[in-house]
Amino acid sequence: MSLCEIVRLDGYIQSTYLAVYPDKIMLLDGGCRPDVAMVLDYIKTILQRPITDLKVVVVTHMHPDHAGGAQKFREATGCLIVSADKKDQWYKGLGGRAMHLVDMSLAHYVARRQGRSPRNLYYPAHLNPDFVVKDRDCVPGFDEWQVLETPGHTDRDLSLFHVPSRKVYTADLIIKLRHKFVAPFPIYDPKVYIQSLQKIKALKPSVVMMAHGRELAIDEATFDMLITQAPKHPRTIKDTIKHKLLWRKDADFSIFKRNRKAKR
């Protein structure tokens, strides 16, 4: 059956999108853990549909505001979780578990900046999807939606392209804060990130649906600006700490040299 509408809901720290059909519903991303009750209540009270109509939840990548609610949605509705076809877990090993905690801390920080009340954001570090998808696959059960691999922010980011309307959900690929566009943080592979921007530009989408920045028609000139201004080097927690330590070391050394010259 044809798509009725794409609904945007205000999630805990991000926009959440529902693709609503007469006989089924798809959640375009897993959201935060606190979003689960909000989304299910919307389905029951506003759409006046059983929550079991939620058939698919896509997880575009493993950050807390995109994967945090997925397992809870599956437990509540029996929906299928769809995610990228990757051999390894994103949060693998001891380092991955530590990064999982760091990412939840960053999500808490964003929530405080947005004036949100503290909520439980914990979710499993490992995802066990029911279906895995690759570039240009259709979302299982939703043939109008094409999966696009758009990595760079992480190694497994997905975007979702609704072919009939040419609307595309890009998760964290593009972020709009107030009156300006910014690249997401982190960026693990700048070269691949730029290629992902170019892929979305080539679609000539009618509307870009962003997790952080709502829906917007983005013209070619803006895409060109995003590509030109995209980071040329990785921007991760590790790189940021390293940069600040080196900056402090250089600053301290400069002070030392100045003091030494003053003594002479």
Image: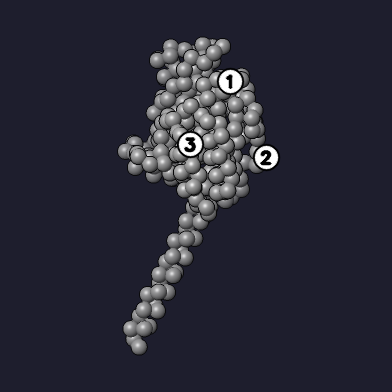
Residue 220, numbered label: 3
Q: Of marks 1 and 2, which one's residue comes earlier in the chain?
A: 2
Q: Is the residue marked by circle 2 packed among few (<14), some (14-19), or many (20+) residues within 10 Å?
A: few
- Frontmost residue, 110 versus 75: 110
How far apart are labels 3 and 2 at the CA level?
Answer: 35 Å
Q: Can you tell which quarter of the image residue 47 is in? A: top left
Q: Residue at x 54, y 13 (%)?
A: 2
Which residue in the protein does label 2 denote? 87
Residue 181 seen in render: yes
Q: Position of residue 50 (x, y in %)?
A: 49, 13
Q: Amino acid at mark 2?
A: Lys
In the displayed image of the protein, which residue is found farthest to the bottom? 264
Q: Position of residue 101 (x, y in %)?
A: 49, 46
Which residue in the protein does label 1 denote? 144
Q: Is the residue marked by circle 3 packed among few (<14), some (14-19), or many (20+) residues within 10 Å?
A: few
Q: Is residue 167 above or below residue 157?
A: above
How far apart are labels 1 and 2 at the CA level?
Answer: 27 Å
Label 3 SS: helix
